[in-house]
Amino acid sequence: MSDHSTHTRRSIVKAVGATAAAGLFTGAASAADTDDPVLEVVESPTASTLYDVESTTAGAFAVGSGGVVLERSLTGWLKLLDGGPTGNGNDIYGADVTDDGKRLWFVGASGAIGEYDVEAGVLNDHSAPMDVTNNFNDVSVTGEAGEANVYVAGDSGKMYYSYENGETGSWDYTTPGSGAAIHAVDFFADRSGHIVDGNTSVFYTRDGGTWDRLGVEDANHNFYAVDSDGFDNVWVSGGGGTVSHWNGSEWVRSDTGDATLRDVEVTDDSGAAVGGGGKFYAYDGSEWVASSTPTGENLKAVLRGDTAIAVGAGGTIVEF
């Protein structure tokens, strides 16, 4: 098992303590008949759509439209940054954290790439690598602060990567599939992970730069999120309320309803998926069970941790 086996796109539990995450959603779905997770909408300092949420050593951060970056403080959510890494107001679509939880990386429109030191409060701008100004949809990073491997999913169908912490001149790229937009990326080890694209395809890599198709055969909905926990443990979610799991030998599909599911996170035998119309589903190791939510806004991302968080349209922040 890799040293990075617990690293997923929206979880940094090994940096902030595994105990907290272990309790989240444990038995949540199986207890849904009597004890649904209590979801509460909390005050947000923005009306901008929030596309991703991450946990760091300094707490939780959310990113979204207009380049907004929010920080969860002891007194509530605060606006940390407005305008993105370049100050031009480019939307931020995806984020991830280094394995030690000390750096928050985020990517977005017009080639925006930012690296924020959550302890020193310093923002580094890595935008437009190789002079690329296409939209970036998601990012996954492995390694520790200042020494990260950075993987960026391009809307043009290319995967951009740097093994030198995003430094100028260290970037390269490859086109894994047909050129369809790459919607999400997640790495579970230094150079091993998965992506999903707009051609209903899932790809995997063992070296960070070479990609092979894994499936999904006969998929009739787009995929928007991937949770890569190993070569034999991959979860993807997408249109039509679908969640598909690769168990090492076959894809197992679950249908939760009609809502598009924009994010999925599963650890061991518990998990969560969120999507359109405020939909929230908890996983108990065998099935996905719907829980009532206090919002009808489209949810874009979910973070599992001591305090679980979902974010979405209109600056919506749900904690549970």
Image (cartoon, rainbow, N blue to C red):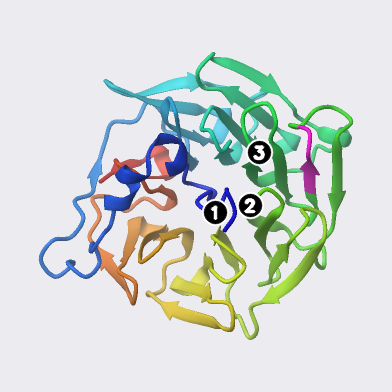
From mark 1 to mark 2, how far is it between C-alphas?
6 Å
What segment is highlighted magenta in the picture?
Answer: 160-164
Mark 3 or mark 2, which has the lower sequence index? Answer: 3
Depth order, front residue of 272/112? 272
What element does badge 3 sit on?
strand
Q: Which mark is residue 5?
A: 1
Q: Name the residue located 88 percent from the left edge and 35 percent from the top edge.
A: 130
Magenta part mainly helix, strand or loop? Answer: strand
Residue 196 visible somewhere in the drawing: yes
Residue of label 3: 108
Left or right for 186, reference 256: right
Residue of label 2: 189
| Callout 3 amino acid | Gly
Whole-percent x and y of residue 108? 66, 38
From mark 3 to mark 2, how far is it between C-alphas?
23 Å
Mark 1 or mark 2, which has the lower sequence index? Answer: 1
Whole-percent x and y of residue 64? 52, 36
Q: Name the residue located 57 percent from the left edge and 49 percent from the top edge.
A: 4
Residue 84 visible somewhere in the drawing: no
- Label 1 with label 2: CB-CB less than 8 Å: yes
Q: Name the residue located 64 percent from the left edge and 42 percent from the top edge.
A: 142
Q: Quadrant of residue 144?
A: top right
Depth order, front residue of 19/172? 19
| Callout 2 amino acid | Ala
- Label 1 with label 3: CB-CB less than 8 Å: no
Q: Which quarter of the rendering shows the N terminus? A: bottom right
- Label 3 with label 2: CB-CB less than 8 Å: no
Q: Quadrant of residue 220?
A: bottom right
